[in-house]
Image (tube, rainbow, N blue to C red):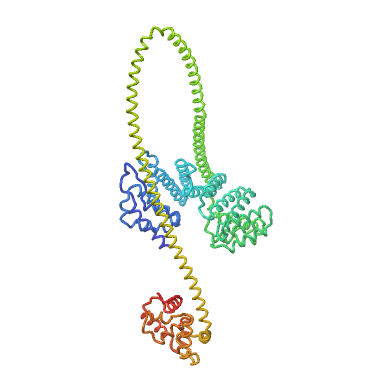
Amino acid sequence: MKWKISIVFSLVLVLLAACTPSKQAPESVEGPNLELSAIDSLMWRQPDSALAVLQQFAASPKADSLDELNGHYCQLLISELLYKNDYGQSNRPALQQAVRYFDSLCLCKGVVRNVSTIAFLDARAHYINGVGYYERDSVVEACKEYLKTLEVMEEKFEEKELTGKKAIFMTYTYNRLVELFSAQFMMDPAIACGQKALMFCRIEPTSPQGVSNILYRLGKQYDKMNEIDKARHYYGQALESMTNTDNLVYRDIVSSKALCDYKTKAGIEPSLSALRNMVTLANTENERLNRFLTIGGILFEERLYDSALYYLVSVFQNTTDEASKIRAAENLRIIYDSIGDREQSNAYMRFLSEHKKSEGENKALVSKLEDMFQNHETKKQGKQAEEARAKSIRRTIEITVPIAVAIALGLLVVTKLRSWKLLRKQQEEADKKLGETKQEHEQEMKQWQAETEKTLKDKETSHQQEMEAKEVEARKVREQHEEELNKERERHRKEKEALENAIQESAVKMGQLEELLEEQKMNEAQKESAKTFVDEPVCQKNIEDVRYLRITTRDNHYQSKYAISDNAFRELGEAVERNYCGFDAKLLRYYKDMKQEDFLLCYLYLLDLNEKQIAVLRQCSYSAIKKQAERLGKRMGIESKLAEFVKKIAAKSDFTE
């Protein structure tokens, strides 16, 4: 294990040297490096492979030219990959610089492209920084970072955007808060965060057991609150959501449900039976000791102290989990006190006084965490209320503006009606005055008529010119239409040619399919020929002679009764010719100097005999047969084994390659 840690530490030193930003922040930030983005994408699926790829990148010249953004991005990836591969954070100073840098980018306006990407990196930086605090037992700082993570995500992204990786990330963050609050017995905040984690995990599951694991954690909170019915409800839902029972989550749920069943007075035996079954399925010592602690607790409640001692002492002496050791010590102190063993009772009392936090420390820590969570919830509710007010104002505007427009239109219509009435009255007065002055203006009217005729002539000339211009324009339009029509005809011609080509290709494919069907028919005929060939008497005799012999490669010869005679060779050749017409001629095409012993070797391969069996029939050594086959294969110019080649050319239906 030490060598693994040293390798990772060395890796981090190399990455720190390669990826530490050396340049000042630019006036504008373009976005993440493509190679780092690819490593980031791989990390969500295969963190171990991503760590190896990041190591290769850090050793390349490209790592030396990273700008400040990508230098901090690289440090973030180092921290995330160390955590996902179960190593401690050895680059915390560089990570915390990255946190401050991404915070500053999120506050900048107008200089950052890909704002949503930077915001997601900022949230991830706060999350992994919180993990580092939690690993160092800085619970308050860890909680502050997790809540800051949620604040960034909820401020920068709408709820509909929280899908895919972002939904998985939200599940991770809420799960960390559930773990933190649960450890401090703050069940109400833990349940609130658990419900949020469940919502996001159902949007994008973190793993096949992700939903079941969250339901199990919710059940544990109600279990701690002694609300057994609710706890059993969530445990039952968790079991229903499981797709695979061969995992630790399933065994934890079954064990917790068994304890709940005991608390509901369902009887001790079913619960103990289920827990002991989980002990037999445990994969690790810590898991086995966790089951022991539950069994010991039930036996303690039943005052079966002798049996409880076996389980609780084993937990206390062997577990590495301090909380489990404290729970075991509490019960062991009471047991030894009840049986009068003051020395052991006092020893466990001393252990508890040394390891349990004071009530004041616990209350102070819980108070801080509750204040932080409540402040976060209050700020979140205030933001939601502000958004609701803005939404309400928008809705009010959407409703009132159309009403105001309708009222304005109504007023306009009324005003127009009044204007029309007034205009009509004025028109009547004007007509009356016109009648009275008609005679006075007859001369003026004649003059006006003459001027009008002249104007009409001028308009007629102008109209004729306009008509000619329109005719020219219409001619241009017709020419354009004809050109488009020609293009359309050309397109149809090309489509027709393409269709004809497709028909020709289909005809070719049909021909190929017919040839393939014909070839399949001929192959079936060849298979029938192979079966007929093996059923020949001379073939059956040769096969039966060697089928049940136990032959080794060191056997040089057998009794002469197994040797194939010249007469049998002749009959075998005739059987080959009957069933594989032209087989000898096919062989001669590959090697014209084929000898009798070469033909015999090929005939025996057609019987599906191996070299050992052929050596017995030929009365020679196995190595001699192997060498003959290799030599003949080289002369025939083939790369595959001779036996496979012989069967292949025998299967061909004509005298072609």
Q: Where, by quadrant of the figure, is residue 247 drawn?
A: bottom right
- Residue 640: percent from the left, percent from the top? 40, 76
Q: Residue at x 50, y 78 (%)?
A: 529
Q: Quadrant of residue 310?
A: bottom right
Residue at x 34% of width, y 23% of height: 459
Task: Find residue 438 and report its image quarter.
Answer: top left
| Residue 139 visible here | no
Decide which of 419, 351 is in the foreground and name it: 419
The x and y percentages for residue 581 are 46, 80
The quadrant of the image that shows the N terminus is bottom left
Q: Residue at x 32, y 41 (%)?
A: 27
In the foreground, 582 or 57: 582
Outermost residue, bottom direction?
560
Q: Compared to 540, does 359 lie above or below?
A: above
Residue 608, placed above or below residue 560: above
**Residue 302 spot, x, y in % from top left:** 67, 57
Q: Nearer the viewer, residue 365 or 275?
A: 275
Vertical relation: 652 (above or below) 488: below
* 396 left or right of 257 in image: left
Q: Report the number of numbered marks.
A: 0
Task: Report whether residue 510 is seen.
Answer: yes
Viewport quadrant of the C terminus: bottom left
